[in-house]
Image: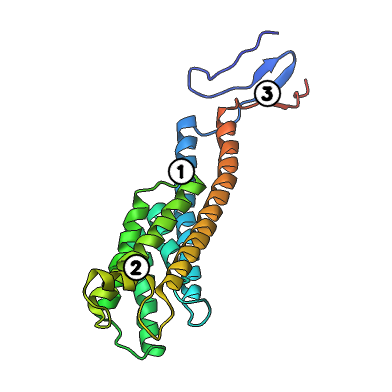
Amino acid sequence: MRSVRGPDLTGRSFPNRTKGRLTMPQPTAPRSQRLVIFHCAHMLHCVRRNWIFALLLVAVFALSRVPGLMPPNFSAAYALAFCAGVYLPGAMAWYLPLGAMVATDALLNVFWYDAAIFDARMMLKTATFAGLIGLGRLFSPRHSWLKLLGGGLLGAVLFYIVTNFISWLVDPGYPKTLSGLIQALTIGLPNYPPAWEFFRNTIASGGLFTGLFVGAAKLVESFEAAEDKEPAAAEDTPEAEHPAEEPNA
């Protein structure tokens, strides 16, 4: 029997008969509308994922700053700043990590070091962290894990050099000569641990936490890519007709 499909002149759909079977048209939204809904839901999911990732970075950073919990200069701060620049969108990449750093510095100065809440050295250190965020903005989340790890290590090295250079400038214990600068970068001041130990801890923690943060982000992205393939495949699949029971004669 010939199959007759489609709406009548009034625009209403009517049942199709094929070989004695009755199939009813399925009321669905237009394809363009379904695609808009899907992409809006995907954007909301990405925003939520960014906030979760940002809060995870801040939580690990805050934990790493508890006094006595980790060796000197062993911190998630370098990885936090770099990964924030890589992964967080827009202004969030700047205000969230820098706000966390300033807040934790202020709390440590008040309740642990018994120092002024804000000082010039703290502001210079915060500016150095902002430079690490800027370094992260030069990278893309699509870069390989190894390349992002290298970027995090580079950021840790730059942070060490800049902050020790600032110490050489402002600390009267260092002679303001080339040999004094080399001392600040290598052995440091007497009665303190050698500066190379701080450099070792800076590199180790920068590599460790950058590798962990980037690895976690890559793992989540792989899971989401697999999930996104299912709705996309469903959009490209023609809708099956659902047969209905043939009415009694």
Helix, strand or loop status at disc 2: helix
For mark 3, give the secondary structure.
strand
Q: Which image quarter is the N terminus in?
A: top right
Work out whether 193 lies above or below 52: below
Residue at image coords 45%, 56%: 50
Residue 142: give its label: 1
Local secondary structure at mark 1: loop
- The span from disc 3 to disc 1 (Cα, nearest Å) is 47 Å
Q: Residue furthest front?
A: 179
Q: Residues within 10 Å of mark 1 (few under 14, many from 20)?
A: few
Q: Is residue 13 left or right of residue 167?
A: right
Among numbered discs 3 and 1, the one appearing first in the sequence = 3
Q: Which mark is residue 98?
A: 2
Is 176 placed above or below 93 here? below
Which badge, 2 or 1, comes first in the chain's sequence? 2
What residue sits right under mark 3 in the picture? 23
- Label 2 vs label 3, nearer the camera: 2
Give the amino acid type for the residue marked by disc 1 in the picture. Answer: Arg
Where's residue 245, x and y in %? 75, 27
Residue at left offset 44%, top offset 57%? 153
Q: Position of residue 7 (x, y in %)?
A: 53, 20
Amino acid type, residue under disc 3 in the picture: Thr
User: Camera-side residue: 156 or 194?
Assistant: 194
Where residue 192 appears, as percent x and y from the top left, is 41, 83
Is 44 above or below relative to 14? below
Nearer to us in this view, 118 or 160: 160
Report which quarter residue 78 is drawn in.
bottom left
Amino acid residing under circle 2: Leu
Q: Residue at x 60, y 27 (%)?
A: 237
79 relative position to 230: left or right: left
